[in-house]
């Protein structure tokens, strides 16, 4: 599917969502009887964050803004993890492994469903590869399965400008470390991950790069699509091809978007995305504002062309997403799919 046709597909999907929202409002009272169990799954759901991986900051802002509250209100048993904001994919995977060990002990559940965002994808895949008997399903949301050229180019730029590298590393490392401290006490839900310690921003830039993820994927290839980004002209094309739906008795699902800027009022769209663009390839890519969309698919791709960007996928900032798109509903629908499949 060409970039043009992918864009057209996304536009049509947006109109379908608006129409469904309009007509759905008329039948909402009929659905309320099922709302208390709509998102209830057989096994607990564990949320796996990407970079900036806080749980809840100062009891005010959740990483999964409005999402986990909505899931719980519809019957889901949800636990939120907090991994290192800036660390290698292996280290983050080890942290998640320990979190799942504790959540299994806390709940008595033998297995869990993982819902991962961005760099949370490799961490979830790491656990599913090492401990498949602990994982019922991995659900990837705009996952960074093939890395981002933004990280590659930023890393190369900073290595050519050592003074700027020092300033950026100190400043961002301080922000990430403070974020970890401020989100250690408050929690989203009844579980709180351990304090992850001092964060080094340079480790995140390395881990998010395409070179790092290439090596990771050679070691942990489970459920990746055979139609990788390299075969789609590094993101110039995007066909939305699924990977194996089940590997080692773990079910894999994914969904993602193809829009870059969706709400000009959103500071992430108006400030962060332009910064990312400075270090993203100038030639045309189909991407979500941070990573190539061709890197989203893992296992069964339930939808690859949503009109949302990388940050909309966690309802940030503060729910400022494209009008007509209800992000928490996408997660309750995800949980309902798991419920219907017996997960």
Image (spheres, rainbow, N blue to C red):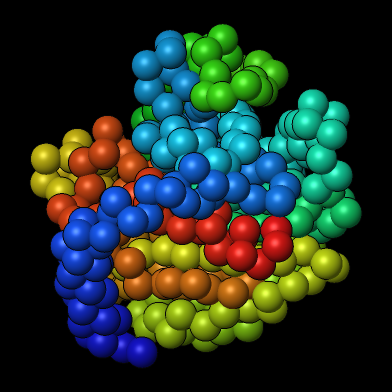
> Whole-percent x and y of residue 85?
55, 31
Q: Which residue does the image show at 78% across and 31% down from the upper left?
A: 107
Q: Which residue does the image show at 56% across and 63% down from the upper left?
A: 337
Q: Nearer the viewer, residue 51 or 214?
A: 51
Q: Is residue 282 above or below residue 330?
A: below
Answer with left or right where residue 166 lies relative to residue 299. left
Q: Nearer the viewer, residue 73 or 280?
A: 73
Q: Nearer the viewer, residue 142 or 276?
A: 142
> Whole-percent x and y of residue 320?
21, 41
> Whole-percent x and y of residue 176?
48, 23
Q: Quadrant of residue 245?
A: bottom right
Answer with left or right where residue 235 lies relative to residue 264. right
The quarter of the image holding the C terminus is bottom right
> Whole-percent x and y of residue 217?
70, 65
Q: Nearer the viewer, residue 336 or 106?
A: 336
The quarter of the image holding the N terminus is bottom left
Q: Quadrant of residue 184?
A: top right
Residue 288: in sight, yes or no?
yes
């Amino acid at each position: 599917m060409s970039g043009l046709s992918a864009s057209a597909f996304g536009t049509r999907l947006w109109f379908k969502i608006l129409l469904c929202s309009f007509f759905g409002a008329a039948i909402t009272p009929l659905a309320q009887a099922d709302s208390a169990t709509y998102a209830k799954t057989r096994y607990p759901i564990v949320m796996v964050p990407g970079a900036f991986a806080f749980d809840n900051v100062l009891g005010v802002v959740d990483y999964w803004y409005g999402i986990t509250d909505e899931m719980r209100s519809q019957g889901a048993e949800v636990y939120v993890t907090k991994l290192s904001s800036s660390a290698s994919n292996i280290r983050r995977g080890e942290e998640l492994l320990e979190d799942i060990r504790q959540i299994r002990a806390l709940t008595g559940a033998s297995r869990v469903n993982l819902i991962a965002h961005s760099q949370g994808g490799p961490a979830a895949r790491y656990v599913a590869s090492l401990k498949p008997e602990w994982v019922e399903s991995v659900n990837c949301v705009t996952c960074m399965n093939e890395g981002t050229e933004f990280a590659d180019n930023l890393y190369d730029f900073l290595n050519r400008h050592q003074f700027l590298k020092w300033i950026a590393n100190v400043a961002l490392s301080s922000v990430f470390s403070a974020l970890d401290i401020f989100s250690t006490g408050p929690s989203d839900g009844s579980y709180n991950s351990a304090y992850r310690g001092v964060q080094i921003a340079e480790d995140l830039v390395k881990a998010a790069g395409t070179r790092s993820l290439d090596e990771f994927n050679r070691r942990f290839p489970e459920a990746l699509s055979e139609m990788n980004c390299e075969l789609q002209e590094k993101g110039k094309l995007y066909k939305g091809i699924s990977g194996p739906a089940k590997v080692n008795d773990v079910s894999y699902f994914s969904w993602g978007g193809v829009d870059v800027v969706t709400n000009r009022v959103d500071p992430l769209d108006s400030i962060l995305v332009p910064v990312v663009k400075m270090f993203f390839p100038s030639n045309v890519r189909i991407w979500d504002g941070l990573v190539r969309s061709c890197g989203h698919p893992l296992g069964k791709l339930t939808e690859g062309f949503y009109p949302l960007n990388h940050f909309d996928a966690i309802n940030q900032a503060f729910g400022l997403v494209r009008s007509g798109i209800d992000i928490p509903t996408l997660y309750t629908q995800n949980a309902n799919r798991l419920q219907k499949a017996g997960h």
